[in-house]
Amino acid sequence: MPKNAAAPSASTRDRLLDAFEELLVEGGERSATLDAVAAAAAVSKGGLLYHFASKDALIDGLLARLDTLAVEDAENIRTATAGPVDYLIRTSVHTGSPLDRAYIAGSRLAQGRDPRAMQVLTDIRRRWLSVIEDAVHDPHTAQAIMLISDGLFVNSSLAGHEQAPQLHDDEAMTRLIAVIGRLLPR
């Protein structure tokens, strides 16, 4: 087999995952049927089934993608030059990044009570919390920082709405990080 023969399949697989993710984000689990995913990815249903034999397999693929992105993010938090708390807070704002989109898609599955999605999201949160606990050496402060991070993510999803608070510029983030610094044990 030629060296790059797998490239189109990988690309098709990613397009299918992207389409599934988009449908979940925009319309929830009910809108993300196999037919809708195939159509959104411009692939035949047979092509979708070649890569993902069932909707369960598609869900597993999406959750594996989410987990991979979250593992990378946890390492980025841990090794951030400005420190884990600074990095976490500054990256908690929804920007439409691959991690943001995969996380929202996983959340939509969890809202539908998919136990696999609920477990992956729980594992991600524990991983992030562990990194912050290691950085601040206090589980209660780490939990408060995680809740601030959650609030930033939710608040930023309202961005563009006229009544949404605009707290996402660099200056506002710097002030927030300074306030969080006052929470840290000495």
Image (spheres, grey):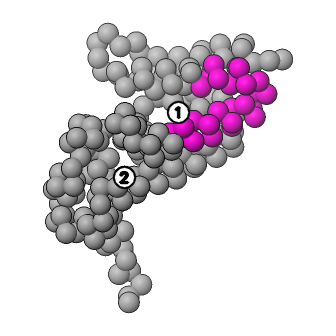
Quarter of the figure that contains the N terminus: bottom left
Say if the magenta span includes residue 57.
no
- The structure residue drawn at horizontal position 23% and vertical position 37%, both measured from the top left corner, is 27
- Locate residue 99, reporting x and y percent: 45, 43
Find residue 186 and report its image quarter: top right
Q: Determine which of the numbered discs, if any, sits on residue 59 in the image.
A: 2
Indicate left or right for 135 with 115 as reference. Answer: right
Disc 1 residue crowd, few under 14, some 14–19, many 20+, Cα 10 Å: some
The residues tagged by marks 2 and 1 sit, at their Cα atoms, a distance apart of 26 Å
- The structure residue drawn at horizontal position 42% and vertical position 23%, both measured from the top left corner, is 154
**How many circles with numbers are drawn on the protein?**
2
Residues in magenta? Answer: 121-146
Q: Earlier in the sequence, mark 2 or mark 1?
A: 2
Looking at the rendered structure, the kind of residue marked 2 is Ile
- The structure residue drawn at horizontal position 52% and vertical position 53%, both measured from the top left corner, is 68
* Majority SS type along the magenta span: helix
- The structure residue drawn at horizontal position 28% and vertical position 71%, both measured from the top left corner, is 50
Query: Considering the numbered disc 1 on the image, is that residue within a helix, a strand or a loop?
Result: loop
Disc 2 residue crowd, few under 14, some 14–19, many 20+, Cα 10 Å: many
Looking at the rendered structure, the kind of residue marked 1 is Thr
Q: Is residue 15 visible?
A: no
Most distant residue in the right direction: 186
Q: Determine which of the numbered discs, if any, sits on residue 155 in the image.
A: none
Tag nearer the camera, 2 or 1: 2
Find residue 61 and report its image quarter: bottom left
Which residue is disc 1 drawn over?
91
Query: Considering the numbered disc 2 on the image, is that residue within a helix, a strand or a loop?
Result: helix
